Amino acid sequence: MPRWWGRTGIVGVLLIDQVVKRRGSRTVLDRVTFAARPGRVTAFLGPNGAGKSSTLRILLGIDRADQGRALIGGRPYRSLREPLRTVGAMLDGVGAHRSRTAWSHLAWIARTHGIPRRRVREVLEQVGLAGHAGVRVGRYSLGMGQRLGLAAALLGEPEVLVLDEPVNGLDPEGIRWIRRLVRDHADAGGTVLLSSHLIGEVAGVADDLVIIANGRVVRTGTLAEVTAGHGDLEETFFALTGGAPGVGR
Amino acid sequence: MRYGRILAGELHKAATLPAVWGGVAGALLGALAVTLLNSVAARAALENGRAEAWGSTSPFENAYAAMPLTVVGAVVLGVVVISSEYTANRADAGGGRQIATTLTVTPYRIQVLAAKAITVVVGVMVIAPATLLVTVGLARLVIGGGAETVSVTAAVTRCLGGTLYATLTGLIAFAVTVLTRSGILPLLVLIMNSTLVSGSLLLTKLTPLAHWLPDLAGRRLFGGLDTVDGGLAPLPGAIVMSGWTLALLVIAGAVFSRRDA
């Protein structure tokens, strides 16, 4: 049973509030506002380049917002004392140096939080990389890299999971596995925020949707609310993002 | 988070990075090769009764002459400790960089940067004396311990001076790489400057102010390895070089804590 199970409160609420990010003269995020709540899987959908990764990077304190706030349980990420125990994040692909092995990557992360080696073995088992723990990350496939990124996210048994394009490069079996993982996490009371440009892959698992296009949130709500008036999620998505069919594929 | 853990994480990261060991091994092998060449020549000079023709036949001197290679090792360490964070993975493997992980795991930027700097200092302080110890051992083996003319006190002092110089150079390499985010330019410039042609040394021909550049200011920390006359004495030189290092580290810290990763 996860450490945080049964805990209540706002710890797991993610709030993105009026976030603005400019790169040069371009506004990449324009007053982006939404929340992700405990017990729910929130899918953050949009075409490539819509601002999904930029938003998540600001939420995780990697990039700075020009305006607005991004809070985790009411606090900025950078003020969390042991962030991995609250938030597990997967960003920017695998996030390991290519000459490292999966084991050495997870081992240094574990060091920073005083997480025992046993837990490193556990997450490697959990993501199906136990047999490849000694292989250099540079030799990994995209799917294996995603699994290692997930292993790092799960290491601290966090209440919140923030996953950027987690199904990228996974085979159908891997996609099914990750859907089950995030579903179970939310059902156990955890918060899941996952981004994707593949609407079909996350439709089945999402409770709440946030749709972003050109740096602006164009719709938020439950799956039923967002798709109301349109045929299905895919149609809704293209109607809202103005993308031609196939763009989000 | 306890600071010791951030430091432990950074030390662990450096110790498990193949490029760090490559740099250390390269510097050690280079130093051993130079020492061997020097020592064989010194021994030949001794045997021919022409010791004065080969500058010094002291094993320590012949090993110490290879210490600039340890400085190269320090530069490599200083550079890769930070450049490895920004190395992109293969594009078909997602192209991610480790820095995103580092800053989500330990989002306290100044502490992370300080831990990396400490890693460089600890690394060089281990590598430099150890390399000198091994090379002096080799030189004594080849030349023979009886030919030693340098006292233990002088040897220890010069070892400490050389180690300080290597440490400061490693930290300068580190600070510059924080700014460039890529190791290529700092490696090229700093290694060339400390081995092939010293750009700073050439600059002294144009202006005596060049003696205040970090590498030249500190060069008398290497006792007995003077290349050109003039410049700062060891103590003021060390202070000037430390000042440069500190200033560059402060700039690196200010940039690193503010910019998007």
Image (spheres, rainbow, N blue to C red):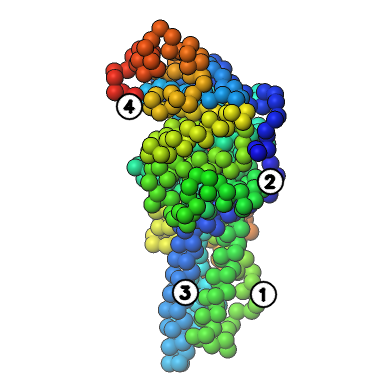
Question: Of tags 2 and 4, which is closer to the observer?
Answer: 4
Amino acid type, callout 4: Arg
Quickly name the residue at label 2: B3
Confirm whether circles 3 and 2 share one chain: yes
Question: Of tags 3 and 1, which is closer to the observer?
Answer: 3
The reply to whether callout 4 and callout 1 are in contact (CB within 8 Å) is: no
Mark 4 and mark 1: Cα distance apart in space: 72 Å
Near mark 1 (Cα within 10 A), the count class, few <14, some 14-19 or many ≥20, is few
Question: Of tags 2 and 1, which is closer to the observer?
Answer: 2
Mark 3 and mark 1: Cα distance apart in space: 23 Å
**SS at mark 1 in the image:** helix
Numbered circle sitting on residue B153: 1
Quickly name the residue at label 3: B32
Mark 2 and mark 1: Cα distance apart in space: 37 Å
Mark 3 and mark 2: Cα distance apart in space: 37 Å
Q: Chain of mark 1?
A: B
Q: Tell me: residue B203, above or below residue B229.
A: above
* Left or right of A139 in this view: B244: right
Numbered circle sitting on residue A249: 4
Q: Nearer the viewer, residue B51 or A139?
A: A139
Confirm whether circles 4 and 1 share one chain: no
Percent x, y of residue B234? 60, 61
Q: Chain of mark 3?
A: B
Percent x, y of residue A192? 55, 28
Near mark 3 (Cα within 10 A), the count class, few <14, some 14-19 or many ≥20, is many
Percent x, y of residue B44? 43, 88
